[in-house]
Image (tube, rainbow, N blue to C red):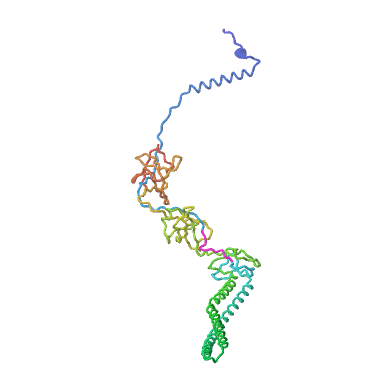
Amino acid sequence: MPPSIPSNGPRRGLRRLLPSNKPGLWSITVLGLFGLATYTLVATAPQPEAILTDLPSLTVEAYTVARRDVTPSTAFTGRLQPRRSAALRFEVSSQLLQREVEPGMTVSAGDTLLVLDDRDFKDRERTAEAELRLEESGIERDRIQLEQAIRHRELQREEVARHMRLGERSLLSQSSLNAAEQKLTELESRVAELTHSVDTGEQRLALKQAKFDQARRDLARTRLTAPFDGKVNTVLAEVGDRITGDQTVVTLVDVSELDFYVEVDGATANALELNQEVTVKTGDREYPGILIALQTDPDPRTFTHALRIRIPGNRAAPGQLAVARLPLPVLRNALVVPVEALRVDAAGQAIFRIEGQSLQRIGVTLGPRMGAWQVVESELKEGDRIVARDAAAMDVRRSVRVRERAP
C-alpha cells in the first residue's frame, strides 16, 4: 500500500522555491508567467486568410460631348441709384426766412423749397430800375437837344457867312465876325458832345439794363425751387440760419426710374451696345433694364468702362443691392459639358471619360459658364462620352454601368 502524501506537501514545496519573507516578488513572478503564456498563444495562433472581393460597379449617367456656339455671360454686383439727384444751393447769401418742405415730400418742378429774407434784394432791384429809367430819359433828352443844336449850328453858319460878306464891304466890324465865329464853334462843340451822348446811349442803357436784370435775378434767387419732379431727400437748414452760396441746403432725387451703375472690363464692354436689353435682379425679383450709357474710352487708372442700366423705379428702391448679368462675346464651336460633370479636388479640375466599362480622369481648363453648362478646354473631343453628374463620387478603380442622358 503506497504511503500517504500530506495534503500540504506541494504547497510546502512551492513555498520552499519562493522566499516566504518577500510576497511582492512572488506576485511579480506569477504575473510574468501569465504574460509569457498569453504571448505564446497569440504568436502560435493561425493567421486568417485574406478574402478578395470585387468593388461593386457604379451606375453613371452619360453625356456625349458636343460643340456649339455659346453666348456666355458674367454677373456684376452694384447698388441702384436714383435716375437724377441734385444737391441744391442758394446763389445769394441771406437769412433763411421760410422752410416749405421736409424730407420725403414729393415736389414738382418749380415748387418752392426754401425762402430767404429778400428785403435788401428788393431795394437793389428798385435802385437799378430807377437808374435804368433815368438813363432812358437822359438819352431821349440828349436826342432832342442834339436836333436843336444842329438847327442852331446851321443858323449860326449862315450868320458867320453873312458877317463875312459884310466884312468884305467894310459894313461890319471884325469883332462882330469874330463873335459870330466863336458862337459857331461853341455850337459845333455842343453838337459833337450831344452826338457822342446819343451814339453811346445804347451802351450806357445796356449797362443799366444789365444791372437791373442782375438785381432782379438775385431777388428771384432768394427762393429755392425744385429743378425737376422728385422727392426731397434731405433739408440741411433751419429758419433763422445764415445761408451762404457755398453750402448745400436741400438734396432732391428723382426715383421715377433707377440706374444700376457698374464698371466692367474691356471684353464685356465690347460685347455691349447702347439701348440693349439687360436683366437686373434684386433679391428674388428680376427687372427688365435698358443700357443707356457706356463709356467708350476706359478709365486710365482702372482700365474699366463705366455703364448705366436703367430700370423702372416703381418696382425697386434706391440703395438696394442688385446683380446684372451681362453677355460676353460669342464663343464659336466650343466644347460644352454639364456643370455637374466637373470634379474639383486637390488634384485640380477634371471630368471622367467613359471607356467601355471603366472611367478615365481627364484634367480640364475651364472657360466661361452659362447656367448649368460649362465651356472646357482639354483632351476631350466631340463625341466623347463622359459622366454627366455626381463627378465627386466617381472612382476610376470601379467598373461602371451606363445609362444615356439626353443632350
Screen quadrant of the N terminus: top right
The kind of secondary structure the magenta stretch mainly shows is strand
Residue 301 vertical position relative to residue 188 in the rendered view, above or below: above
354 in the magenta segment = no
Query: Whole-percent x and y of residue 261?
Result: 49, 58
87 in the magenta segment = yes
Query: Whole-percent x and y of residue 133?
Result: 58, 79
Query: Whole-percent x and y of residue 271?
Result: 41, 55
> Along the line of sight, which residue is nearer the eye, 288 or 182?
182
User: Which portion, as a residue range, is magenta?
Assistant: 80-89
Position of 249 with respect to 281 (left or right) is right
Residue at the image position 57 percent from the left and 20 percent from the top: 32
The mark tally for this picture is: 0
Outermost residue toward the front in this view: 170
Quadrant of residue 402 within the rendered picture: top left
Residue 377 vertical position relative to residue 184 in the rendered view, above or below: above
